[in-house]
Image (tube, grey):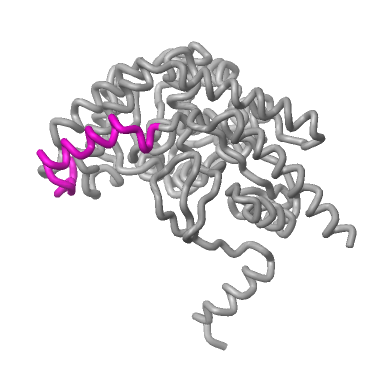
């Protein structure tokens, strides 16, 4: 038997309805996109505020690229740390209400870098079971004793905290859970962390830009300080519309990451033009609160219409609106039924979600119109009916 028979593995994956196919995007990000030569209404992007294709963001990127080139050229610790990177770090610290921030090239690298830099074999990490894969992978690779507590269950977390005698303890959670769309009980987690002398780290990839009075994210929405949440991670490729990530906290934290986070030390810096574009995105987030207000209104409209139509959405009040289908084949059937009507919605299957928790992951954006959201509801009703009929037959 050939130990490297990858084809049989792929065939088995396909039989389980878990095979992924990449769409070929042929346009900019937006509420309407061109994929594989056809136009679709786009309800699967994380461009929550519609900034990925904003004219000012594009213009800033172009101007910076003309001045400073395309590539970062080197790691931050060699000769890749540009003035624009430094300016963006200072602005992100100010935006999130933290003393300091440090840039990473992706959210995955930020989570991997901070957790492996801060924890080791004498330590313990406590993660929500539904945390993003990057957090779970980082926890396992850190060498710390790895604990997964029941989703958003502070009592279960407390039981696990009482059992440890670790040198350092870190509680890690998503601010907004990327597949369920619900928010972590941050206020309770802060109290628990303080009672147990533990750090609290929040990955706010899906909260930054859209939650809070100024868009500073989950911690602002819960009125939590840098002391309450000493380690805050945010990404730039979702609501801010660019790419990359950052970790914000004390000056001692960011200096520790600069010195010891391997995913920071040993990778090329983001292009300076991306940093420039992100500075413009942050300006727009601050100036245009109507984007968050419109997104909130669209979420309310969508949920009200879904309820009236008998569609059972998960209890999310964020831009992520999941519709459970349980089986992977049902998720794929609904995805195809929507696609046939000119609408793209992602079918989420294991390993992204647990077995029997497959779903359509519907995401809304401030760039959508009310008419587009209404059309989505009509298409979902058709797709749901179509799938039920197929199951009966």
- Residue 65 in the magenta stretch? The answer is yes
In the rendered image, the quadrant that contains the N terminus is bottom right
In the rendered image, the quadrant that contains the C terminus is bottom right
Q: Say whether residue 364 is left or right of residue 79.
A: right
Q: Quadrant of residue 243?
A: top left
Identity of the residue furthest to the right in this view: 392
In this view, 137 is above or below 366: below
Q: Which span of residues is magenta-colored?
A: 51-76
Across and down, in percent, residue 290 comes to 46, 17
Across and down, in percent, residue 116 comes to 38, 42
Asked whether 50 or 162 is in front, the reply is: 50
Asked whether 291 or 173 is in front, the reply is: 291
Residue at x-position 62% and y-position 29%: 182
Q: Kindly tell me whether residue 159 is visible in this rendering.
A: no
How many numbered dots are placed on residues in this image? 0
Residue at x-position 57% and y-position 37%: 363
Residue at x-position 44% and y-position 19%: 215
Across and down, in percent, residue 214 comes to 42, 14
Q: Quadrant of residue 52?
A: top left
Q: Kindly tell me whether residue 86 is visible in this rendering.
A: yes
Residue at x-position 45% and y-position 36%: 47
In this view, 203 is above or below 140: above
Identity of the residue furthest to the bottom in this view: 1
In this view, 371 is above or below 229: below
In this view, 155 is above or below 245: above
- Residue 169 in the magenta stretch? The answer is no
Across and down, in percent, residue 218 comes to 50, 22
Asked whether 375 or 225 is in front, the reply is: 375
């Amino acid at each position: 038997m050939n130990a490297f028979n990858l084809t049989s593995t792929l065939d088995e994956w396909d039989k389980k309805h878990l095979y992924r196919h990449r769409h070929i995007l042929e346009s900019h990000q937006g509420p309407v996109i061109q994929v594989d030569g056809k136009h679709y209404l786009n309800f699967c992007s994380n461009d929550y505020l519609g900034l990925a294709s904003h004219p000012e963001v594009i213009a800033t990127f172009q101007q910076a690229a003309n001045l400073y080139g395309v590539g970062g050229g080197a790691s931050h610790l060699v000769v890749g740390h540009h003035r624009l990177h430094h300016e963006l770090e200072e602005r992100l610290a100010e935006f999130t209400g933290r003393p300091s921030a440090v840039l990473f090239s992706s959210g995955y690298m930020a989570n991997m870098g901070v957790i492996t830099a801060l924890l080791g074999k004498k330590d313990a990490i406590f993660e929500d079971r539904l945390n993003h894969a990057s957090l779970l992978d980082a926890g396992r690779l850190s060498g710390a004793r790895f604990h997964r507590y029941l989703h958003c269950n502070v009592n279960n977390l407390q039981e696990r905290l009482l059992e440890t005698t670790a040198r350092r303890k870190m509680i890690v959670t998503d601010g907004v859970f990327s597949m369920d769309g619900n928010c972590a009980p941050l206020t309770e987690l802060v109290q628990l962390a303080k009672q147990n002398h533990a750090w609290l780290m929040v990955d706010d990839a899906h909260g930054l830009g859209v939650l809070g009075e100024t868009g500073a994210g989950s911690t602002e929405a819960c009125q939590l300080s840098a002391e309450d949440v000493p380690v805050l991670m945010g990404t730039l490729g979702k609501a801010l519309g660019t790419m990359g990530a950052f970790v914000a906290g004390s000056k001692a934290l960011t200096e520790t990451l600069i010195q010891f986070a391997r995913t920071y030390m040993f990778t090329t810096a983001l292009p300076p033009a991306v940093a420039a574009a992100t500075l413009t995105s942050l300006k727009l987030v601050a100036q245009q609160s109507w984007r968050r207000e419109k997104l909130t209104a669209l979420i309310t409209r969508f949920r009200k219409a879904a309820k009236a139509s008998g569609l059972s959405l998960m209890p999310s009040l964020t831009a992520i609106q999941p519709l459970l289908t349980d089986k992977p084949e049902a998720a794929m059937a609904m995805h195809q039924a929507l696609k046939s009507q000119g609408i793209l919605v992602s079918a989420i299957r294991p390993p992204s979600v647990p077995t029997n928790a497959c779903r359509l992951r519907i995401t809304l954006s401030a760039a959508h119109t009310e008419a587009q959201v209404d059309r989505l509801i009509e298409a979902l009703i058709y797709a749901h009916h179509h799938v039920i009929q197929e199951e009966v037959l």
